[in-house]
Amino acid sequence: MAGWEENGPGTAVPCADPHGDPFLRARFAVPALPVTFLRRERLVDHLDQALRTPLTMVNGSAGAGKTMLVADWTAGRAECVAWLTTDAADLRPGMFWAYLLQALRACGAALPADVGDPADASSVSPALLARLAAALSVRDRPVTVVLDEYDRVSDPEIAEQLEFVLHHAGEGIRLILVTRTEPLLPLHRYRTAGGLTEIRDAELAFTPGEADALLERHGLHLPEHAVRGLVERTRGWAAGLRLCALAARESPDPETYLKEFEADRSTVADFLLAEVLKRQSPETQDLLLSVSVLERFCPALANALTRRTDAEPLLAGLHRENAFVEHLGHGWYRLHPLFGEILRAHLRMRSPGLEPELHRRAAVWLRRSGSLTETLDHGAAAGDWDLTARALVDDLAIGRLLSGLRADDLAELFSPMGPEADGPAPDLVRAACELSRCDLERGLAHLHHAEQGLARLEPGPASPAGESGPAGDAPDPAAARLSCALLEALAARLTGSPDRAERAAETAERLRAQVPARLLDEHPELTALLLTHLGSTRLWAGRLDAARDALSAVAGGPGSAWTAPAREEALGRLALIDYLNGWLGRAERKAAAALSEAERFSLPRSFGSGVGRVVLAAVAVERDEPDRAQALLDVVAAPDPSLRDPVLEAARALAAARLLLARGDPRAALDAARPDVDADVPSPWSQAHTARVAAAVHLAEGRPREAAGVLRGMPDEQVACAVEAARVQLAAGSPGSALELLDGLHPQTRLGPAVTVRALLVRAQAADETGDAAAAHRLLAQALREARRERLRRPFHEAAPWIGPFLDTTSLRALAAGWLTPGPAPVEERPPVVEELSGRERDVLRRLAQMMSTEEIAADLYLSVNTVKTHLKSVYRKLAVNRRHDAVHRARELNLL
């Protein structure tokens, strides 16, 4: 097989699954053949012929020799074969496809980088599957994929996805399923079309001749009638023949032993226990029964369970003897699944109550070794909830109950935890679970209980020196308090409490220095979530610049699957800030980036996601695209009342009300404009939006005085309200008052066309009403130029009908043609910026506008010339230009300079 670490020259391959754990390489390895394996040419030939069909199914009972047959055939193939052994521990769509993609890369089947990888173990994006099928369909030679133990796949969704890829990949793939049961695939269609090869139990069964050859490989030479009798009794079952051979060669009379052997199910189980387990030494029996609770194990872990030190030679001996202990490589082993099941059943009968204790010992050892996922699984299986919760908290992994990637899995894992599990760590887990469901009352109660418990663990003023650390069963204080700070920030976000969020952020900043940097690096989601909660709370409170700082740190931080949910939320809220400031193009690009982040990692919807789509809907309203706006809002339908994020609800109300106004339903717009949010402090921009809608309703119904009254109390920083108030004054017949309002505006932030165009239209209408047609024409031309770049149509429709005669003039008709009125678009119109410029790219662009050379820019910014050239190329790409002069001109058009 090709190397594990690369997918073609210079292309890095993902090294971790959606849980953040390393891929288990043994799942991609073709199983090794035992020395007694018998190659059966008739079956190998059948598999060779099977490559003529897209789908092959090797379907047989346990121990029928399916896997060994296909492994033997695979070893003889010259071309690459991707092998994946499915894992019953986590068989959900995202995990399945993450491993399948890794199997393709591991065998050397190069995939385009844009195919992507699932980040959520429970789901996978349809777009990813489409990209995979498209990549396979253009291969020169098909890649063969073997899915071993496919009977473990019981999720119909995975089967449907596999069928989709198989169908659309065409001649680019040959799929071989090794399974005990009928797979959930439309086999009848493949049979009808001649696209299915089947190898079943009847064909897998050993013939008398093959059984004779197999017995000879085990050192047994039996007469023909004895072999035939054994084949009849075992019905040619491969495992049964091998088990019989192993036992018979230890008997003084193999022929008599095999004649008396009965191959029913209970006999096989009894045989495994009596002829394999009970023939081992007491130490080996104890080892096998102990490790039966593990999916995989190494000698050190086995020693922790047996509380001895002899596991290494015992495991090596069992593997050499082919005693159903498989070596996975790198010192790790696993039991044959059937043998493991029988051993666990025997353990429960022989030592009732020992199984939970074995799980607890495993959890303790795995926690020390740094394997968090397995620690949690075994801790939960042991019912030791304090140990399990402490592992999660001490590892700074509390954010994984909130991040959306494995939140549902962890919540389900902790769901059996009862009230008897008491202490700060279990309380923190309960608080995280409740707050992730937006149950503030219960979540805060658990959080306060955890904080009280941590306070009791702190040493008093008279504590002896050296006794300041936590008790052995207590969580690490710094990690626990940092987890508290994260949950406090989430509670502040859900309650719209900016002061509480700031206190939580300050506390977290102090505590970061007290926890190992390694843990912060391993769990970047904690910092990303904390900043997202802080930024969202600041946004709610109208502190837009401070919110942008926090959210930009998340959106521009190092990307990973674990931080993807926070990045999606941060990008959506940054888009909302741009929208509120009137920058539609910027808002659209950030909102699209948020959606792309969610699609890239197949993120599930959480209580805070969806702002990106709401912003796109609001932008569509401003561009007079109501159908698109409605479609986007329909996707972000109102959630359960208990799952409400204040910013998302206010943004949804904003977009829905603006859409209803555009569709001529002011009363419905007024009802929709009031978000159903219970927050500690009001949101200035949400209140301003509600006031603007109410004013628009009064204007539509001929009550300008009432409209002015609604807007009168709005803060000065709500410029859009002031512009709306000026429009109300125009409607009341007071153009002078309208201009006074606009002249008195001194916004602290540079505003975009969605605000400035409306202000220009008010000035233009005031000029028209006072008889200054030339000024009205000039102002309207300026408004058209600014609006054209953003395709901003709604303000002109709101200002009609006085604009109509002006648009009939030649100069203004040309400015409006193609985007506001029918006609060809101006040739000079260019697309918006492809992607937001970085801070360093803006630095380079500003010096470019000063006519500085590349060398001068490099010296001024303390960069290398090559680095400056790289930034210039990126600027040209993002501005859709090819030359320096064009870049500066384009940047000025977009108000970037």
Image (cartoon, rainbow, N blue to C red):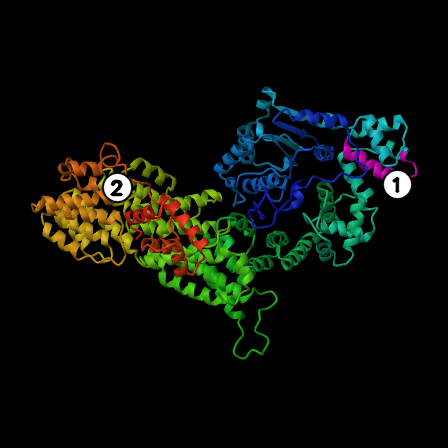
Pointer 1 with pointer 2, Cβ within 8 A:
no
**Magenta-colored stretch includes residue 174:** no
Residue in the foreground of this view, choosing between 837 and 476: 837
User: Compared to 732, does 251 lie above or below?
Assistant: above
Residue 829 appears in the rendering: yes
How far is mark 1 from mark 2, CA to CA?
90 Å
Q: Secondary structure at mark 1?
A: loop
Q: Residues within 10 Å of mark 1 (few under 14, many from 20)?
A: few
Residue 552 percent coordinates (x, y): 40, 55
User: Compared to 459, does 613 lie above or below?
Assistant: above
Residue in the foreground of this view, choosing between 549 and 304: 549
Hey, which residue is sitting farthest left in the picture? 771
Hey, which residue is sitting farthest right in the picture? 252
Residue 374 percent coordinates (x, y): 62, 52
Residue 58 percent coordinates (x, y): 68, 30
Residue 608 appears in the rendering: no
- Say which amino acid is labelled 1: Glu
Q: Secondary structure at mark 2?
A: helix
- Say which amino acid is labelled 2: Arg
Residue name at image x 78 percent, y 39 percent: 34
Which residue is denoted by mark 1 in the rendering?
250
| Magenta residues (range) | 237-254
Question: Which quarter of the figure has residue 696?
Answer: top left
